[in-house]
């Protein structure tokens, strides 16, 4: 059962409809044969091509045999539908609904805007599941994070997992005899990136930066609390309390000095390290030689 809401009259210029200018040709898209295909094909389409796919959905018993599509330009087709393969250029974008929000509710809220709506494969009249193609007032996405944030603000009832620019969707399809609905609505561009949303994005970015600064401060605080003195450590005490009969050439002095330094570095105990340094200098070790041992201990930490 196919329910038509509105079919565009392609013999009638789109400019004659009460709408803002909308891109009719050379629309950048990505197509994939199925969800298991490792190759994605960058194509260009006309608005008429897109509407015809919606008006004449693929009929199948298994949606995974169906092809997939999304809007945008592709960097590397061999990567398949991955996050890094889409250039941030497309005023068309797609929204997915499957959480109980009805088609009628959507149509009422967004009645003034241009959109193409079609039901997804598992749609039923009891539980509406549908996708919407809309036309924004800027080339989206700006980046993954901003696109997700903006769409989440503008389409609160949409599936939050489908707001990424790399998200690729099944083209229109349904089982033979299953309910399928679609609608073409002529209207204005959706004001996706207005000043309000822009300020929200910038505020969110500042909030995250502040949160990261607080986190780093807390981590530093925890580290300072966990520092402990290693003055009573056996290896440190062995070096500090042993009087070596000879100068730095003594093998025991060399080995025990290094062991004491390693303990101080492991414990981040700079105070005890300074005591070890002073004793070493009294035994004629140079600052350069001591620093070399400290650097070696840091590398081994």
Image (spheres, helix red, strand yellow):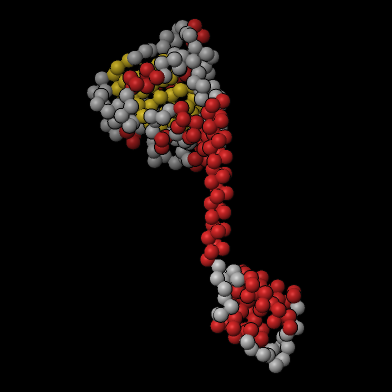
Q: Residue at x 29, y 31 (%)?
A: 122
Q: Quadrant of residue 286?
A: bottom right
Relative image position of residue 137 (x, y in whole percent): 54, 22
Please tell me which residue is depicted at 49% across the width and 40% down the height of the picture: 83
Residue 49 % position (x, y): 44, 20
Please state which of residues 40 and 2 is positioned toward the viewer in this rendering: 2
Query: As drawn, is 54 to the left or to the right of 270?
Result: left
At which x and y percent is residue 282? Answer: 74, 83
Instruction: Say which quadrant the C terminus sits in.
Output: bottom right
Figure check: 79 above or below 52:
below
For this orientation, the residue located farthest to the bottom is 245
**Image-based side of 294 in relation to 96, left or right:** right
In percent of the image, x 37 and y 22: which residue is there?
106
Position above or below: 202 against 8? below
Q: 294 above or below 117?
A: below
Where residue 184 sits: x, y (%)? 40, 16
- Quadrant in which the N terminus is drawn: top left
Total marks shown come to 0
Q: Nearer the viewer, residue 266 or 220?
A: 220
Judge whether residue 221 can be spotted in this image.
Answer: yes
| For residue 271, side relative to residue 103 (left or right) | right
The answer to which quarter of the image holds residue 198 is top right
Can residue 56 be seen?
no
Q: Looking at this view, is 222 or 16 the one in front? A: 222
The residue located at (57%, 58%) in the rendering is 220
Query: Quarter-wise, where is residue 110 in the image?
Result: top left
């Amino acid at each position: 059962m196919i329910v038509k809401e509105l079919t565009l009259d392609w013999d009638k210029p789109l400019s004659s409809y009460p709408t803002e200018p909308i891109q009719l040709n050379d629309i950048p898209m990505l197509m994939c044969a199925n969800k298991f295909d490792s190759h994605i094909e960058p194509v260009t389409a006309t608005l008429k091509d897109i509407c015809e796919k919606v008006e004449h959905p693929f009929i199948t018993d298994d949606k995974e045999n169906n092809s997939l599509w999304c809007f945008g330009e592709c960097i590397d087709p061999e990567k398949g539908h991955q996050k890094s393969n889409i250039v941030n250029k497309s005023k068309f974008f797609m929204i997915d609904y499957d959480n109980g929000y009805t088609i009628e509710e959507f149509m009422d809220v967004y009645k003034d805007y241009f959109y193409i709506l079609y039901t997804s494969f598992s749609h039923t009249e009891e539980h509406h599941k549908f996708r919407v193609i809309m036309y924004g007032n800027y080339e989206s996405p700006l980046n993954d994070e901003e696109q997700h944030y903006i769409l989440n603000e503008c389409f609160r009832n949409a599936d939050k997992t489908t707001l990424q620019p790399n998200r690729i969707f099944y083209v229109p399809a349904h089982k033979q005899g299953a309910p399928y609905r679609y609608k073409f609505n002529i209207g204005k561009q959706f004001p996706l990136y207005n000043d309000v949303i822009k300020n929200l994005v910038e505020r969110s970015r500042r909030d995250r930066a502040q949160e990261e600064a607080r986190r780093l401060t807390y981590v530093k605080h925890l580290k300072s609390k966990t520092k402990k003195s290693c003055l009573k450590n056996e290896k440190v005490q062995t070096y500090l309390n042993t009087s070596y009969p000879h100068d730095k050439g003594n093998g025991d002095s060399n080995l025990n000095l290094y062991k004491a330094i390693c303990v101080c570095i492991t414990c981040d105990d700079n105070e005890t390290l300074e005591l070890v340094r002073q004793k070493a200098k009294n035994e004629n070790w140079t600052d350069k030689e001591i620093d070399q041992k400290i650097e070696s201990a840091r590398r081994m930490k």
